[in-house]
Image (tube, rainbow, N blue to C red):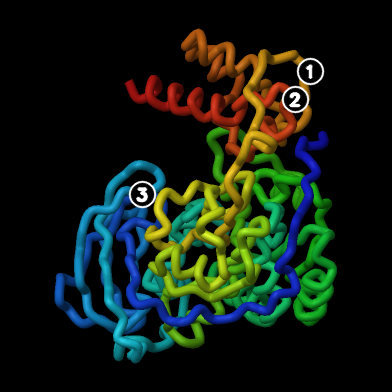
Amino acid sequence: MKLGGIKLHHCKNTEDSQSTVLPLPAKVRIPMSMHIGAPCKPLVKKSDIVTVGQKIGDTDAFMSAPIHSSVSGKVTNISDYRMSSGNICKIIEIETDGKQTICPDIQSPDLNNKESFIKAIRESGLTGMGGASFPAHIKLNPKQNIDTLCINAAECEPYITSDYRQMVEAPEEVIDGILNILKFLSIPKCIIGIESNKPKAIELLTQKAEPYSQIKVLTLPCTYPQGAEKVLIYNALGRIVMEGQLPADQGVIVMNVSSAAFVSRYLKTGMPMISRIITVDGDDVIGKKCNITVPIGTPVIDVLNFAECDLDRAERLLYGGPMMGVSIRDVNDPVIKSNNAILAFKKFNKKNASPKPTACIHCGSCIKACPFHLIPPDIAHAYKQKDLQALNDLKVNLCMNCGCCTYVCPAKRPVAETNQFAKAFVTSMNKK
């Protein structure tokens, strides 16, 4: 069986842009929720002095990850913050002192078994760097037996090259992180999946992995959404993750390539997740398209100013890529752990405005494009009728909102959006 998908213009304008470090912002705003699960509670109060790597948020909840300060300075405010999901959490504002004083508690973890490794990963604050925000210590500690670690290095969204820069600038970090995960979790093998449009990354990682028979680099076709977990697992291993299953149910752990590299850095230095590489790109409103290492909590406006963005013309701002990215509602909103890109596009005018949707012509393009061969027209009809049984039969919960259906729809209908409304309806009804 061949999975669906689409071909996209990759627009990898920054693939040859060496990552640089963003100048230290005057302040950072660090939300207490940057992960799937329960938000953290602030461990500091207004007027406290904090240092780089100091834990400033945590919780006893199972599904969560601690949060650390990316700067040294003074806590100037703790307030409520509305996240892109609509939920509210606390946000800690820190005025930087310019010294970047390292927290005295920072030291590389002492590891001697799986339990100490999992504990260290939790203390690192690592959450999925590919956008899913799943706490890494939970992903790496499933109850199921795991036979394969699958490293997601596809980076199939247009524009984004932050993972690519990690691979070509420090491939040894990727391999070292993988080796540690394999060792402490007793996983026998690893597959690194990379799209074929990244030959330099394929070459470098193949060279670095050559001494290790348990690590193989797999070249993947350039088909979006190649980097989706279920798609990657099927194309790399031929295994199907069924509805309601996790990758671990098929004996697989999927981890983003930058996450694996972070594991290497953390185990050597003890410095938790306080920064990440992001791509800044878009159309001609971005004067300096680049890859930059940004402290967590940095206001988006600081990043855009560094990239010489023409804010007078920039109207469409996104966290992430154009297919699955999230709109940035305020340029003072912060960069968080899951952000791998900030994209900016100019204002629409009458000539390039999106056309209004028209009636579905039943061409089947959306069905062909869907990675899982879902039937969006039937889903839309069932949702309109509020037919719970039909939506369950149509497997609407398999939809991952990749946007392929909307992208190919000649009638310009909000197909993916309707699917998400249908999923939310099913969730709400199943809770009753």
* Front one among 174 and 210: 174
* Front one among 185 and 196: 196
Mark with earlier residue (1, 2):
1
Q: Percent position (x, y) of residue 191?
A: 73, 62
- Residue occupying the point 53% across, 73% down: 306
Q: Are marks 1 and 3 in contact (CB under 8 Å)?
A: no
Describe the element under mark 3 as helix, strand or loop. loop
- The residue beneath circle 3 is 83
**Which quarter of the rendered picture does the C terminus lie within?**
top left
Mark with earlier residue (2, 3):
3
- The residue beneath circle 2 is 410
Q: Percent position (x, y) of residue 304?
A: 51, 66
- Residue occupying the point 83% across, 51% down: 221
As drawn, the residue found furthest toward the top would be 385
* Front one among 82 and 331: 331
Is 427 above or below relative to 379? Answer: below
133 vs 310, left or right, is left
- Residue occupying the point 47% across, 55% down: 133
Q: Are marks 1 and 2 in contact (CB under 8 Å)?
A: yes
Q: How far is mark 2 from mark 3, CA to CA?
A: 33 Å
96 vs 126, left or right, is left
Describe the element under mark 1 as helix, strand or loop. loop
Q: How far is mark 1 from mark 3, CA to CA?
A: 37 Å
Q: Can residue 115 be spotted in the picture?
A: no
